[in-house]
Each structure stands twice: as C-alpha cells, then as structure tokens.
Image: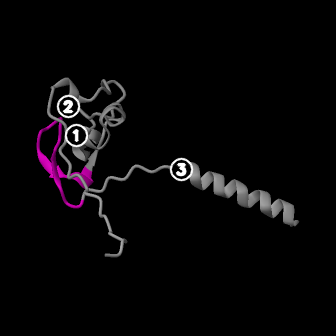
Amino acid sequence: MSKRKTKIRRNIRKKNNRSKRYYRKGGNGENVKCCMCERNIKKDNTLVPRECLMKYGKAAHRICQDCWWNPETGFAREDVSHKCPGCQKNLPLTEFKKETPIFVDLTED
C-alpha cells in the first residue's frame, strides 16, 4: 500500500473517532424511581425514554428493565405510546449528584 493511501485511511479513522459520542449511564449504585411502576431500583438497571432524554438530559425520567420489556404492558411495545410516562404523570425529574469540578492551584506563593 502506498504512503498516500495509508495517510488517507488515517485521516478517515481520526474523523470517525471524533464524531462518535456515547451516552454513559454512570449509576454508581444510586437508586432511582421507575416512572411506570414507581419502584426504587438501581440506576444501572434503567432505561430512559428518548424524548425525555433529549429534553432534560441527565435528569430525565427512568424506566426499569421490567417495565420497558414487559410483553403485556411494556414501554417498548409497538402499539403503546412512546411518550414519557413520567412527563405524562407530572412526576418530578430524576435527581442526580452534581459533580463538583476539581481545581488545582498552580500559582506559586
């Protein structure tokens, strides 16, 4: 393979790596309330309705895996409305711990 083709492939890889963004759950064992069944569950075992995630970000309502995938009354069924049940019930948003930034003083006294 010529040097030019190798260089082009490297540039393509760099561009692809920059454009990817991933949503991180980051539960750390915190408990949240499912907006469908209103049980307290670990944040790691929840899913977020897309509409609510786009609107509220980290503070969006959460749905437990059982309520999401339930074959009879689940949120993921095709014949069910996909609007956020927490927003429809006017439930408060999920509380999350705000991370305080760490500042390092690099000035000399």
Mark 3: amino acid: Lys
Mark 2: amino acid: Gly
Q: As drawn, which residue projects farthest toward the left? A: 39
Identify the image quadrant of residue 91. top left
The type of colouring in the image is one colour
**Please, is residue 32 above or below residue 103 in the view?**
above
To which residue does mark 3 refer?
20
Q: Position of residue 22 (x, y in %)?
A: 45, 51
To which residue does mark 1 refer?
67
Q: Which range of residues does the magenta coloring cover?
A: 28-45
Residue in the picture at 17% in, 45% down? 95
Horizontal side of 9 relative to 89 (left or right) equals: right
N-terminal label among 3 and 2: 3
CB contact under 8 Å: marks 3 and 2: no
Q: For the residues carrying marks 3 and 1, which lies nearer the camera in this image? A: 3
Residue in the picture at 72% in, 56% down? 11
Q: Position of residue 77 (x, y in %)?
A: 33, 31
Q: As drawn, which residue projects farthest toward the bottom? A: 109
Q: Position of residue 100 (x, y in %)?
A: 25, 57
Observer-nearest residue: 51 or 57?
A: 57
Mark 1: amino acid: Cys
N-terminal label among 1 and 2: 1
The quarter of the rendered structure image containing the C terminus is: bottom left
Residue in the picture at 37% in, 71% down? 106
Horizontal side of 107 relative to 4 (left or right) equals: left
- The numbered disc on residue 86 is 2
Q: Position of residue 2 (x, y in %)?
A: 88, 65
CB contact under 8 Å: marks 1 and 2: no
Residue 40 in the magenta stretch? The answer is yes
User: What secondary structure is found at the residue carrying circle 1?
Assistant: helix
Q: For the residues carrying marks 1 and 2, which lies nearer the camera in this image? A: 2
